[in-house]
Image (cartoon, rainbow, N blue to C red):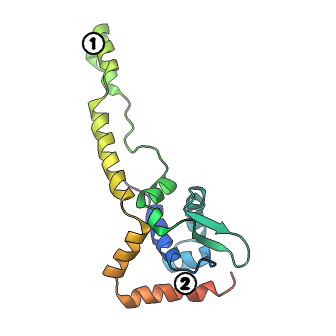
Amino acid sequence: MQYSIGVEYGLHCLVYLIDIPTDSTIGIKELSAFQGVSETYLSKIFSKLTKAGIVISVPGVKGGYKLAKSPADISFWDVVEAVEGATPIFQCKNIKNNSYLCRDEEYAACAQASPCTINLVMLEAEDSMRNVLRNKSLTWLNEELDRVLTPQSRKETREYFANNNQVSR
C-alpha cells in the first residue's frame, strides 16, 4: 500500500497557506516553483483539494488558493481522502465463498452468511490508520515544523511566499 506523492505535495503546500493574510492567496506558479514540481501536476492536486472543501480557489490576476477553513480543522486524513479518494485500501473479494468446501450447499450457506475474518482485520487496521491521520491537523504539522526546522528556514519560506504573493501572476 502506498499513497501517491500528491498527498505529500498537498500537505507541504497547505502548510504554506497557513501564514498568509486572510485577504491573500498563493498561486500555483509560486507553489510549484517552491516545490520543484510542474504547475499542471500541482493544479490537479489543488483541484481535488478545492472539491473537498480544503482550499478555496480565487480567480483573477491576483488569484490563487487559500485555506477554506482553520488549519486545526484540516486533518492529514482529509488531505489523503481528497487526493486519493475514499475507497478502502483492502478490497475483499470474498474468496472464502469459492473454496472447495463451498461445493457443499450447507457449508456454502454458512460460509456466505458469516463475514470474512481477513476482511474484518484489514478494515480494522485501515480504521486505526485513518484515526491516526485524523488526529494530525495542519496546525499540528505547522507546530512540528517550527520544532524540527531551523528558524531561518521557516523565515525564508514565509518570506518567499510573502514576496512572490506581491508579484502579479
Taking the spot 46% from the left edge, 89% from the top edge, the residue there is: 156
Q: Position of residue 15 (x, y in %)?
A: 47, 73
User: Residue 24: where, in percent of width, then height?
Assistant: 62, 79
Callout 2, which amino acid? Answer: Phe
Name the amino acid type tagged 1: Tyr
Question: Which residue is identified by label 2?
Answer: 161
Quadrant in the picture for the C terminus: bottom right
Quarter of the figure with residue 21: bottom right
In this view, the mark in front (2 or 1): 2
Residue 1's spot in the image, x, y percent?
A: 35, 51
Which residue is depicted at the point 29% across and 15% down? Answer: 110
Circle 1 sits on which residue?
107
> Height in image: 156 above or below 74?
below
Residue at 69%, 84% (x, y): give it: 168
Label 2, residues with CA under 10 Å away: few <14, some 14-19, many ≥20: many
Q: Is residue 45 visible?
A: yes
Mark 1, Cα crowd under 10 Å, few <14 / some 14-19 / many 20+, is few
